[in-house]
Amino acid sequence: MTQTDDLTRIAEAARDWRRDLHQMPELLYALPKTSAYVAEKLRGFGVDELVTGLADTGMVALIRGARGEGPVLGLRADMDALPMDEKTNLPYGSRHPGMMHACGHDGHTATLLATAQYLCAHRDFAGTVALIFQPAEEGGAGARKMIEDGLFDRFGIGTVYAMHNQPGLPVGEFATRPGALMAAGDRFVVTVEGRGGHASAPSKSLDPVVAAAHLIASLQTLVSRFTDPFDQVVLSLTYLQAGAPGALNVIPDTAVFGGSLRTMTVETRREAEAHIRRILRAGAEQFGCTAHLDWRPGYPVTANDPAKTALAVEVARQAAVVDDSCAAVMGSEDFSYMLEAKPGAILWFGNGDSAELHNPGYDFNDDAILPAMRFWVDLVARELAPAA
């Protein structure tokens, strides 16, 4: 059997694994069914070592090459789903109400499982492959928790890669870029405290609603007047709450609003936060109010190592079309923590003409498993090539 035949056979089996996983979506760190399913498959494939319990339900499977000693290469897949109802009407749709694999992590996991099965049977490499199955990418910072639990120190991983499917990119194609690929994503809530009173006598009050309205408008100048036009920053104010519904003659004591900040560099992220704090402090004082900021740091910038990105692009181009200078996106990804700790890269791989990520009509394209799996296998061969 040729390599292509073996890859195709395993990818066809992985289609069923992916659909099994799609039916059992679980959230954040609470992945008992998903992690048990993955662990059972890995043991059946014959991995050399399986360590479970990292970040609660995460795991690392080690596959040692037959060509001697060498470095340890990490390949990561995320496993968690999203808290939303599925609206695909697929026969293998979610069986867990309020949970759905709307980001394709079921496909990422199935693809890495397929890679594990192939590598267990074809160990023509020097060194060790560490397959990282991670929980809680969707807002739980599972990557950071795995690192804190000893992911890199315990297994000696020197380089780490990941992939994420991309709707709209043709199946079999890849895209990435050196440096910043995805944004840092921070969130914040502002509570404006004033003094309530009767709407007929606003001079006897300190109106937090007016203050909040001015602050929201002033914050928009962060991008339009205080950011380099060639930098990428997105500030979105997404909610405003004040007073009681129907209480149209009452000035409330407080108003609350919040939103998110997306930035593409460490420096801009730091400067933007400082500017937001200045606007809130000075702006609230104009109205005799106080603005309390609850800053909620999110994932850092996802920045690819240039050398590892170039290597990954070269490997992918052996069998696929690759855009090596794709546009950066303002979404966030907790693989950023792994790339802060070790050199590596993350790539998009095509999901074809599908619904967008985080959409209730989304489904991972099973045809994407084979080209993504082939890339993992070729990357291992390149990164862990025996010494001449």
Image (spheres, helix red, strand yellow):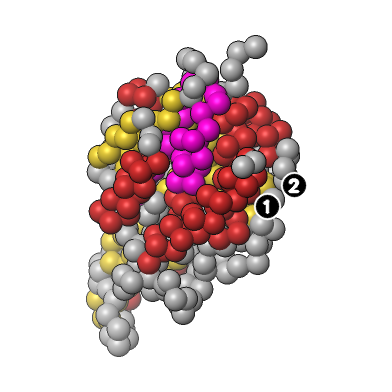
Please say whether residue 265 is visible from this viewpoint: no
Q: Quadrant of residue 153?
A: top left
Asked if residue 125 lies in the magenta stretch, the reply is: yes
Q: Which mark is on residue 172?
A: 1
Q: Residue, x 42% and y 72% (percent of image)?
A: 93
In percent of width and height, residue 211 lies at 40, 64
Please name the residue shown 25% across and 53% down the image. Answer: 32
On the picture, is 29 further left or further right than 77?
A: left
Q: Which residues are magenta?
A: 112-136
Q: Residues within 10 Å of mark 1 (few under 14, many from 20)?
A: many
Looking at the rendered structure, the kind of residue marked 1 is Gly
Give the labeled residue for mark 2.
321
Give percent across and percent down for residue 375: 61, 41
Q: Quadrant of the C terminus?
A: top right
Q: Nearer the viewer, residue 26 or 93?
A: 93
* Callouts 2 and 1 close, C-beta under 8 Å: yes
